Image (spheres, rainbow, N blue to C red):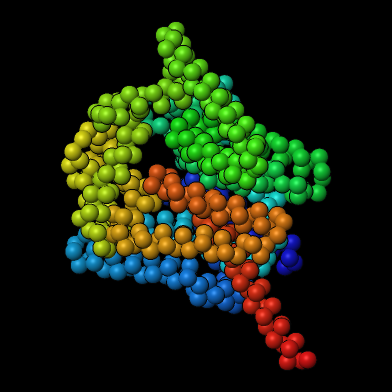
Amino acid sequence: MNIVIKNRFILIILFLFIVLQDFAIRIGEFVVPYHFFAILLFISYCFIRYNNLVLTNLKKLYNTKTGKYLTFFIIWIILGVFVSILTGNFIPKSFFSNFLGNFLCSNLFPFLIPALIVPFFIEYKKLCKFLIILYFCVFTLGIIEYIANTYDITFIQNLFSTIVNRVATKTETTRVFVIAYNKFRISGIFQEPGGFAAFIFISLPLVYFLCTSKTMWLKNRVMDYIIKISTLILMPICLIGTQSPINLCFVLIFLGFIFVKKIITIKIKHKAIILLSCLGITALIAIMTINILSLKNIDITDTYLNRIVKVIDTFRSMTLLVAAEPSLATRIGKFSGAFTIALKHPIFGIGFGNIMKEWPNAVLSLPFTITPELFNDAILKRPTAAGVMFWKLSAETGFIGTILFYLFLANIAYTAQKIKKYYTGYLYNLINNLQLSLILYICVSYYIFLQPFMWVYIGLLESMILHYKIFKAKSQIDMINKYKTD
């Protein structure tokens, strides 16, 4: 098999992890994600044909601090399982479903495959080409879905609903998967609009770098320019179309930090002019917004403002918030329920995958009003509890397991900060923006789900770290051999 086919094979694996992360097929009682088959494909080929290379790189990863933290985290999960067995909290079906289906298939393998394989089979420039085409396709599909929903194109609606294992509906009372406030929200290839918005937010540094880079990713100059401009335009349209206020706020805060950083680096005499201009524009927008909201004949029902205003008006009372913004109220209830369990099991947690053992009681005993969705999930014992990684880990692995996991993430970001100065050109920008995406996730992990695409980003960042260390070790060996020869 030649190197071209190897490149395409690995890129197809990464494509399946990023694009098909919410696509699934139902087999009996189980919902099997399509990227599970990507893992089988990878294991059946790479581990058989290149087992020595994979095992060697796995050993190198283990010898790093990142590998040690990951190993300690897995050991802590196993210890927690033994404790849950002894305390009678162990649920075999739930554990194997979460450990094999979620942790291994959706977390660990999407991290290990790019980390161990990419540096040896794929040029990073080809990886950048793959990513920008991927972003273009994902955002285009989001626009197509919005058009299909707006103009009621049944065939495309059914296609999205089927392959993403999503139930599309037009009622306000249902869970917010496609519709909100009688307006269609863009979900694209994700199960719900919030997931798509989180994907855009976490991918923002990479998308901006790829679209504004002077490096040509495609051989044809015209196509390269069209793809870059189109992706850069489609990204904010899709973000607005998701109608996710919290992710929009995250993006605005991030852009604000970037803006402040830019101001710090410019000349002092220009800072005053820019700051005064920005303050003037901000004040003008604020005055216009207040005036618009004060006009009773202006209908803001179908806008972001309506959801934001409702949250501000009702946040003082959980009962009012449940009626005004059930999506946010449900998340608050989930976080509170998971934290209650974590306080009861602070060391080892309830056991990985065993959160449903105490979840109904934890939710139903909360000292405030909960949403109908949260109530139904608790009564029916649906496995949707505390899906956000931070809260789920706190409840299932205790605070120590959560700290180990965040040390694993933080060490990757810290190591990337130390070695990125040795990269130049687009490689420096790539590692810098992968690191920035990781930092963005760490900052908002209390609210955003850790999806497989994020693990791919972390794996790609780790691949560049391992690539540098391997290159550095090889250079030192070459220098020693040259010295001996001389």
Residue 281, image quadrant: top right
Residue 288 can be seen in this image: yes
Residue 291 as seen in the image, left or right of residue 92:
right
Is the residue 425 above or below the residue 238 in the image? below
What residue appears at the point 25 percent right and 45 percent down from the top-left corner?
Answer: 337
What's the residue at 48%, 63% (across, down)?
Answer: 411
In the displayed structure, does residue 54 sit left or right of residue 409? right
Q: Is residue 480 above or below residue 419?
A: below
The residue lying toward the viewer, choosing from 336 and 272, is 272
The residue that appears at 26% across and 31% down in the rendered structure is 318
Q: Position of residue 408 (x, y in %)?
A: 44, 63
Percent of width and height locating residue 452: 50, 52
Q: Pick the residue in front: 343 or 77.
A: 343
Q: Quadrant of the N terminus?
A: bottom right
Question: Which residue lies at the image location 60% right of the left edge and 65% below the top edge?
Answer: 419
Q: Residue furthest front?
A: 269
> Residue 265: where, in percent of width, then height?
63, 46
- Vertical relation: 178 (above or below) 342: above
From the viewer's perspective, is residue 211 above or below residue 480? above
Q: Residue furthest top?
A: 297
Residue 477 locus on image (x, y percent): 67, 83
